[in-house]
Image (tube, rainbow, N blue to C red):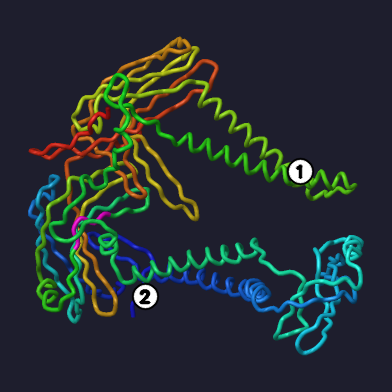
Amino acid sequence: MTAIEPVRHSPHVMVHFCSPDRRYEPLQPIRIQYQIELSAGSTVQAIERSILWYTEGKGEEDLGVHAFERITDGATIAAAAGAGAFESHLPPSPLSYEGLIVKVRWCVRVRLFFEGGRDFVSEHVFDLGTVPAALSRAVP
Amino acid sequence: MRLPRFLAKKRGDRRTGAEVWGSVGDALFHAILLAAGMVFAGLLLTGVAVPEWRINHHFLAAQGTVVGKGLARRAASGQAASTWQPCLRLRYTTPEGPREAWTLRGAIVPDRQAAITALDATRLGKPLDCWYDPTDPETVVLERGYNWWMWTLTLFLPGALVAFGGAGVARSLTAWGKSEERQAAAGGRPHGGLAAVGSYPGVPPCDDLVNSPGTILAFRLPIDSGESWALLGVGLFALLWNAVLILLAVNAGLDLLGGQIDWLLMAILVPFLAVGIAGIVIFVRGLILSTAVGTTQVEVSDHPLLPGGRYEVLLGQGGSGTFTSLDMAVELEEQATFRQGTDTRTERMVVWRASLGTWTGLQLAPGTRFEGRGVFQVPATAMHSFASEHNLVSWRVVVRGRPAGWPPFTRSFPLLVYPAPPSGTQHPKAEVPS
């Protein structure tokens, strides 16, 4: 017997980085193009586009925003809610890092705000710098 | 209808969560604290502050005469023990005519005889200055002034609740409906298009690491003062604990001199004494260990360090006596701070280490110091020093010693490693202070 699962229509955000392998050097320019597929009937009230780093691992998550843009103007939203692009120059630090209990990740986020207060965020990770991952276990 | 999500999850390139519900909970918690503070403040104001203020500003002065004496007895419901307070019946004149009313005078005491003795000090017919309430002339007092201790409590306790709760509510309202990126961007971090960034975001400042010249190499590194602060904390704890202990002991001693033994106080004193002695022992032992072994100094040929760079490190160890071994290494440590229940915990993990030298069988003479040198190269692809609110990636020189006759010690000296310079750019270098 097969259970009937409800179909939930979430928006779909496709992101294209100017560097195909998503690896960037510090101070390098970054350009992101994106396409948004909205579910039928949903109305976007605001869009936020940001480039940021955040920490992962054992500790509480910390966050640093490098570039941030919020679009609330109706005409601009109509254009940006279908497809758009934004760019920035990356900072010299912090570099992406895959540690044992501390990890630093860079990402691009596109956040959509809908009528009724709900929001949807799409996150796309990239690497800044070429720091190799830490050893697989701690030094005794 | 969609139910709210109470847990944040990362699903592929999507993040789902309940930031709104988290904000509701946070706002509700702080609103409860704010409301409790305001209720508490209202009770203290109406019960303590306002009556005292009225006595000092609205009550009218009069000349009273003592026409009667008595004791006010107070007993808690269901308890046999009572307390006693002397009270006087005063006759005084108001514009509406002569009045007579009882008023309290003197301290509340548990001993009835002591209250009677205090009452005997005031004779009938004695003239006394008094102040009566013009709106209720039967209310009269013999003293004016402010109880500053009560006022401090009145302001401090509810004030702390109102400030903490109010700040939390304001923070929740400010963050209401805002994404974490927007909040972070509004918090002073660079945002918007081609944002101008600081020198090295996420890299801790190095001002305190390059302001001390070395005796032989360019910079002398400061010692990581974590142990010193811990020792100071133990010392303060021992001081405060033993001060309380002395107060309790004096009370117990006075009871003994008066022929009474408060067994509950005695029972409390025994564990208090044990903790007090343990505090002193731990502090004195830590003080002796930190001073008897001799100072350790570390100097480095350049600072901040760069990936791929080769650096010389000098170890200077003072003191006297024999060292079984002395070891110097460079380490890269990760540190993560997280909440576990109501506790905040910090976990550390060394992920890279390079030995700079090990020396054995050292014989140190007073007035001289042992000097050892080491050279190391920061890996070209090494992670730079990184610091955020809850996460840390830190470089340091660690010295581990085994002095004969003393417990082994570990002392660490922070280093700062910059990110690798992008091709075609140069890092700003620290100047050697003169």
Q: On residue B3, which mark appears?
A: 2
Q: Residue at x 24, y 50 (%)?
A: A105
Spatial CA distance of label 2 from label 1 is 60 Å
Residue at which label 1 appears: B249
Could you tell whether B140 is left or right of B411 in the image?
right
Could you tell whether A55 is left or right of B33 in the image?
left
Which stretch appears magenta?
A64-68
Labels 2 and 1 in the same subunit: yes
When asked about the image quadrant of residue A109, the answer is bottom left
Q: Nearer the viewer, mark 2 or mark 1?
A: 1
Residue lying farthest to the bottom in this orientation: B96
Q: Residue at x 45, y 47 (%)?
A: B345
Q: Residue at x 77, y 71 (%)?
A: B142
Chain for disc number 1: B
Task: Return the x and y of residue B154 as percentages of the image width and height.
Answer: 60, 66
Task: Return the x and y of residue B132 as percentages of the image width and height.
Answer: 74, 79
Q: From the viewer's perspective, is residue B403 above or below residue B146? A: above
